[in-house]
Image (cartoon, helix red, strand yellow):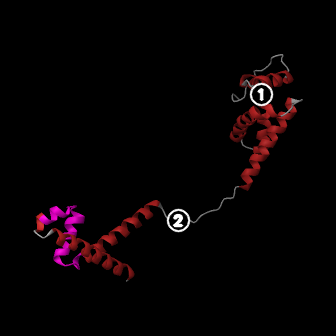
Amino acid sequence: MHFLKNISASSTTDAELVSLYRQSSDLKILGSLYERYMELVYGVCLKYLEDAEAAKDAVMQVFEELVQKLQKHEVNNFKAWLHTVAKNHCLMKLRSMKNKKTASIDISLVQSADELHLNGELQKEEEFKKLEQCLQTLSPEQKQAIELFYLREKCYDDIVAVTGLDWNKVRSLIQNGRRNLKICMEKEVDS
């Protein structure tokens, strides 16, 4: 099992390494201490989680927990304390997995993003059809002024030049045409 390697065979005791780590917060010291017991931690995690990959992940997560916990807790017997930390980590993981509730969903009841997009496009298409119908209800002068102003994006002065109508007449045609379109569109929605 190349995942675990028990290299640490130095003569320094666990208590000395714990003390050195607490003084310096040097992760190399903690890593050296942890390497002595990685197989133990892996065994505990495998026992509780019953999955090799989950146990490997838990071994790394326990080490991450140690970084802070070892600074906070007074540890006399590191091996026993580490065993308890690993066991508690696995039990918490199992408890959190147990509390996650899953439910099966009937896929036919779920609306996809494609359908939502399509529904939006269909709605716009309906509105354009209504707008075309309502444009036909305007007087020819109002229709021409509305089309030039909104569809061709001409300004009042350009419309005056194209139609030969008075500037105030163009303004009146656009305002009245817009109001008539709004009334027509609202009638189409209500019916």
Q: What element carries label 2?
A: loop
Give the position of the N terminus as an image quadrant. Answer: top right
Residue kind at label 1, given as amino acid type: Tyr
Q: For mark 1, what is the residue?
A: 34
Magenta-colored segment: predominant secondary structure: helix
In the image: residue 177, left or right of residue 158: right
Give the position of the C terminus as an image quadrant. Answer: bottom left
Figure disc tally:
2
On the image, the x and y values in percent for residue 165 come to 12, 70
Pointers 1 and 2 in contact (CB under 8 A)? no
Residue extending furthest toward the bottom: 191
Q: Quadrant of residue 79?
A: top right
Give the numbered dot on residue 44.
none
User: Is 189 or 176 nearer to us in this picture?
Assistant: 176
The structure residue drawn at horizontal position 87% and vertical position 31%, both measured from the top left corner, is 75
In the image: residue 128, left or right of residue 142: right
The structure residue drawn at horizontal position 73% and vertical position 55%, both measured from the top left corner, is 99
In the image: residue 110, left or right of residue 145: right
The structure residue drawn at horizontal position 76% and vertical position 40%, both measured from the top left corner, is 46
Give the numbered dot on residue 110.
2
On the image, the x and y values in percent for residue 184 come to 31, 79
Residue extending furthest toward the top: 11
On the image, the x and y values in percent for residue 88 come to 81, 43
Range of the magenta residues? 135-160
Q: Quadrant of residue 19?
A: top right
Label 1, residues with CA under 10 Å away: few <14, some 14-19, many ≥20: many
Q: In the figure, 171 relative to 23: above or below?
A: below
Is residue 144 in view from this perspective?
no
Q: Is mark 1 on a helix, strand or loop?
A: helix
On the image, the x and y values in percent for residue 158 come to 15, 61
The verdict on residue 153 being magenta is: yes
In the image: residue 124, left or right of residue 73: left
